[in-house]
Image (cartoon, grey):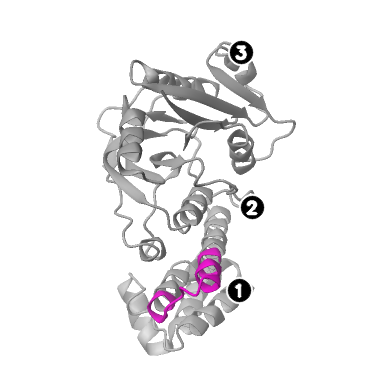
Amino acid sequence: MIDVSIIIPTYNRRDLVRQAIDSCLSQANGRGLKLQIVVVDDCSTDGTRDLLAQYHEHVESVFLAENAGQSNARNAGLSKATGSYVKFLDSDDVLEAASLYREVSLAEADNSDIVVSGWGAASIDEQGRTVAGTEKKWPAPDMEPLPDTVIWGRAVPTSSALYRRSYIAGLEWDPRLSKLDDWDFFCRAALRMGKIVALDSVTYWMREHDGERVTNSTTMLKNAREHHTILHKMEETLTERGELTEARALWLAKYYYKELRVLSLYDRPSFERAVAHILTLDPQFTARDAERTKYMRLLGSALGFRRANLFHSFIKRRIKRV
């Protein structure tokens, strides 16, 4: 029997977390897996505690004393983990049938530290049923060669990674992050330079439902700030190990540029700091290769990338006033 710990943080998702738990319980049937399912309730008020009581024989429930956010909830669950492998599952996700067995089998056969896999997304109705025709799938990324693939932006969402527990010992989810926390955890784990193998099949389904993924200026700015925070972590790690080559510095400069437009629009001091840092990494930086929008490439050629972004923000503000 191979022990696997599945950690599920949840907050006010009584019906969805029930489906997440059920998808986990079905994984062990006759497949040589011993599951430890840890559900961390982040002070739900919708009857989640009563629901978890129904699973007391199969689920270890952790109840936080105050609402602390999903990263703290995952850390609380990770501290309880005893399995040889760890799987993080969001409470509105469900595992594909027999997927955990495939992940563990590949990890054991290749003696890998992380297994990355494909994933799917689909809309669900109020009863949690998949809406036909909304299914989408993404393949597992090739993570070789490390660390370059991490710098290039290759990663997987929370539930598409299986970790060897001994490999992530001492690694915690950053509670300061809430938008890109899964990217941050995966990148820091990958930059430990362990063996990562890819499983070319869908292992879980991300369910899109009402009330999530709202995009506004606040979330856009938070996303941009967290994006730069994570890039700084990557850069510091590579610098400390003497692995920040010129080529990697040039690529990081392009990656910092990715969120520059949002910062120029909503956070001028952070924008100016980011511009200075980009020029530290690449004194000859231009937006030609990093900018996807044609008119911004033209503006950048005429004005330089800093002035082009500021001009774009000026126009956006004028349009909003009108």
Query: In the rendered image of this protein, does residue 153 appear above or below residue 44?
Result: below
For the view shown, which residue lies furthest in the right direction? 65
Q: Please name the residue that numbered disc 2 is placed on.
A: 176
Residue 275 position, x and y percent, is 53, 79
Residue at the image position 46 percent from the left and 29 percent from the top = 4
User: Looking at the image, which residue is at 63% across and 18% down?
Assistant: 47
Q: Label 3 to label 2, Cα distance in Å?
A: 31 Å
First-in-chain label (3 vs 2): 3
Q: Say which amino acid is labelled 1.
A: Arg
User: Which residue is identified by label 3?
Assistant: 53
Q: Nearer the viewer, residue 14 or 56?
A: 56
Who comes first in sequence, dot 2 or dot 1? 2
Query: What span is in magenta?
Result: 233-249
Q: Residue at x 58, y 15 (%)?
A: 51
Q: Is residue 195 left or right of residue 139?
A: right
Question: Which residue occupies 33% across, 69% down?
Answer: 292
Callout 3 crowding tier (Cα within 10 Å): few <14, some 14–19, many ≥20: few
Q: Amino acid at mark 3?
A: Ala
- Give the CA separation, mark 3 to mark 1: 50 Å
Q: Which residue is mark 1?
A: 268
Give the x, y percent position of residue 278: 49, 79
Query: Would you say residue 119 is visible in this rendering?
Result: no
Residue 90 appears left or right of 137: right
